Image (cartoon, rainbow, N blue to C red):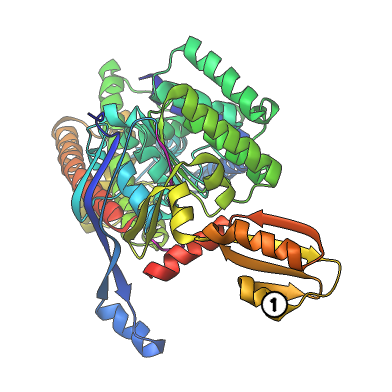
């Protein structure tokens, strides 16, 4: 375990080393909070509910989205792809450490730093702008929310990992990766609650893994998804997680074979 | 009876599939739809044993198959055919007990974290290789002293010069005192003083720990100073495997005589004594068969008013070149 902890610690140090880009990232996220706040305040002018969200639910969605993005959508798979393309991965493959474990430590470090700063930002925004927040009425909601969030994190890791393995076969994996991120932001509900979309999209999306990442856990928190819908959502998460574990393992094995066949 | 070899390679072959593209625009479009591959043999049917504690030089021109062989030995490449055993392990299985005793340093690659001081990567390796705190402190102190890199470990790696980085790299790679150490071009890009230091360090490490070292280098000084035995490879095949001193006798039957005279030299007369490599007024270089050296020297001194005279072995570069010429 010590080695993964050391990898985590080095990753945090590395993160802090790039203070400028870290601060820029935070500035971006503050801007997004303010923009969303202004937009939804305007939309809610003179209404109590919209798309089935109360005012406090909607604002909690926006702020919660910011925190969840930090927690779910943070990863270092760009570095992983870089390491495959440049052959730096060799130096890990030669040492007695699991590369997947190493990647997990590195991701965890990214998540830790992002999470701390996003919570600070959101708390600051809620306090300064006096944003009304929604807190679950049932204590059990927190537990279920925790579970869906954990599954969302696992799902995102597997997906980004799968996309990153393309680097084993092509040095042009950055393109697919970029499209993946863009599509993910949209279809996971990071831009807006998916309720905005026409019904048909909503029902398709509810079976795809993407909505499981942000939209679903947030709506569990807001207690808008309960009972059978909650069970179905958890089922969807587990189904995709199992499928992706299988796919990631196969792709990784084959990728390593391809790498070892051609040399890095 | 000899002890079991630390590295055992039998009939190792490795071929690569390389995509080929027809020339020009048409070829580029065709390659979009149909990729054609060519099979390129990188290493063909090579065998050798290396005994525990040996320090062997692995020589050959670019593209000879050296790096491919090292990658197979390190477990990064699957062999196409043949057997490789290191300390009894098949390297490509990447078993923990093998990796705990193994290390490879590639001059062009780094395992150090670029943005952090090297000291941090040392800690990571301490944990990866499960080195106790006591051993870690002692070894780090010893290695940093020998390589003279104490202060460098506190500076982010990217701020180090190439030579400094290489030393830190080597230090990091041997913290776990690997029994098997592969060094790919360890002195590449270093100045002469630094090269010397690194060579001394490698020799001391080999002696003190009894580790087995295989080293590739284009720098013949590395080979001459460190390696008793060399393996020479070209075109994926082994051309020579044996003592460096024997190779000198076999491929360099001549010695190099440089002489300077007080009067212009009579070249025709010199040609009767040996092969004239170059001449310039009153000085000349001759190659003279080893067994004739003393006889020819006597004649020379009798005929020519010699001001300066030296008898040397041919430079090792020249000898290696001859090995390639003869076998290529």
Position above or below: B27 against B247: below
Identify the image quadrant of residue A26: top right
Identify the image quadrant of residue A218: top left
Q: Is A130 on the left or on the right of A191, as rendered?
A: right
The residue under the point 56% across, 20% down is B140
For this orientation, the residue located farthest to the top is B134
Q: Is residue A60 visible?
A: no
Of residues A95 and B312, the one nearer the viewer is B312
Please provide the residue range marked out in magenta: B54-64
For this orientation, the residue located farthest to the right is B262
The residue under the point 61% across, 31% down is B117
Q: Is B324 on the left or on the right of B1, as rendered?
A: right
Of residues A5 and A119, the one nearer the viewer is A5
- Please provide percent x and percent y for residue A69: 42, 39
Circle 1 residue: B269
Dot 1: few (<14), some (14–19), or many (≥20) neighbours within 10 Å? few
- Disc 1 sits on a residue from what chain? B
Indicate whether residue B254 is drawn in magenta: no
- Please provide percent x and percent y for residue B282: 81, 71
- Please provide percent x and percent y for residue A83: 43, 48
């Amino acid at each position: 375990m010590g080695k993964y902890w050391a990898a985590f610690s080095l990753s945090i140090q590395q993160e802090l080393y790039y203070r400028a880009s870290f601060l820029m990232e935070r500035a971006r996220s503050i801007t997004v909070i303010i923009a969303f706040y202004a937009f939804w305040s305007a939309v809610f002018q003179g209404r109590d509910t919209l798309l089935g969200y109360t005012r406090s639910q909607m604002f909690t969605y926006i702020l919660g989205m910011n925190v969840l993005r930090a927690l779910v959508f943070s990863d270092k798979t760009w570095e992983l792809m870089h390491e495959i393309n440049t052959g730096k991965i060799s130096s890990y493959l030669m040492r007695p450490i699991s590369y997947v474990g190493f990647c997990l430590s590195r991701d965890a470090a990214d998540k830790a730093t992002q999470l701390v700063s996003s919570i600070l930002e959101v708390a600051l925004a809620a306090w300064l702008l006096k944003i009304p927040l929604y807190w679950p009425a049932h204590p059990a909601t927190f537990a279920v929310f925790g579970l869906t969030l954990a599954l969302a994190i696992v799902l995102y890791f597997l997906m980004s990992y799968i996309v990153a393995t393309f680097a084993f076969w092509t040095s042009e994996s950055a393109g697919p990766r970029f499209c993946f991120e863009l599509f993910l932001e949209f279809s996971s509900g990071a831009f807006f609650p998916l309720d905005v979309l026409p019904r048909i999209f909503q029902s398709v999306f509810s079976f795809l893994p993407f909505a499981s990442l942000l939209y679903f856990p947030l709506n569990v928190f807001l207690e808008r998804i309960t009972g059978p819908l909650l069970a179905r959502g958890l089922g969807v998460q587990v189904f995709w997680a199992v499928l992706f574990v299988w796919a990631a393992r196969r792709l990784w094995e084959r990728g390593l074979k391809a790498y070892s066949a051609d040399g890095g | 009876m000899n002890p079991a070899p630390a590295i055992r390679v039998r009939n190792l072959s490795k071929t690569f599939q390389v995509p080929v593209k027809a020339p020009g625009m048409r070829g580029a479009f065709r390659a979009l739809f149909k990729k054609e591959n060519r099979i390129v043999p990188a290493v063909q049917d090579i065998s050798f044993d290396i005994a525990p504690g040996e320090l062997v030089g692995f020589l050959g021109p670019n593209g000879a198959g050296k790096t491919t062989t090292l990658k197979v030995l390190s477990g990064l490449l699957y062999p196409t055919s043949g057997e490789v055993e290191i300390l009894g392990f098949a390297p490509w299985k990447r078993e923990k007990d093998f990796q705990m005793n193994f290390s490879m340093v590639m001059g062009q690659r780094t395992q150090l974290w670029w943005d952090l001081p090297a000291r941090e990567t040392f800690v990571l390796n301490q944990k990866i290789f499960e080195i106790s705190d006591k051993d870690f402190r002692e070894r780090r102190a010893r290695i940093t002293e020998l390589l003279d890199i104490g202060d460098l470990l506190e500076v982010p790696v990217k701020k180090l010069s190439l030579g400094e980085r290489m030393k830190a790299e080597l230090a990091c790679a041997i913290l776990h005192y690997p029994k098997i150490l592969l060094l790919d071009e360890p002195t590449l890009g270093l100045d002469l003083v630094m090269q010397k230091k690194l060579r001394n360090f490698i020799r001391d490490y080999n002696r003190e720990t009894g580790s087995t070292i295989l080293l590739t280098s284009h720098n013949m000084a590395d080979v001459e100073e460190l390696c008793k035995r060399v393996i020479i490879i070209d075109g994926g095949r082994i051309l020579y495997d044996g003592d460096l001193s024997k190779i000198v006798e076999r491929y360099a039957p001549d010695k190099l005589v440089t002489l300077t005279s007080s009067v212009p030299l009579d070249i025709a007369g010199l040609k009767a004594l040996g092969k004239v490599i170059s001449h310039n007024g009153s000085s000349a270089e001759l190659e003279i068969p080893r067994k004739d050296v003393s006889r020819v020297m006597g004649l020379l001194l009798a005929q020519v008013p010699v001001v300066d005279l030296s008898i040397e072995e041919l430079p090792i570069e020249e000898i290696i070149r001859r090995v390639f010429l003869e076998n290529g």
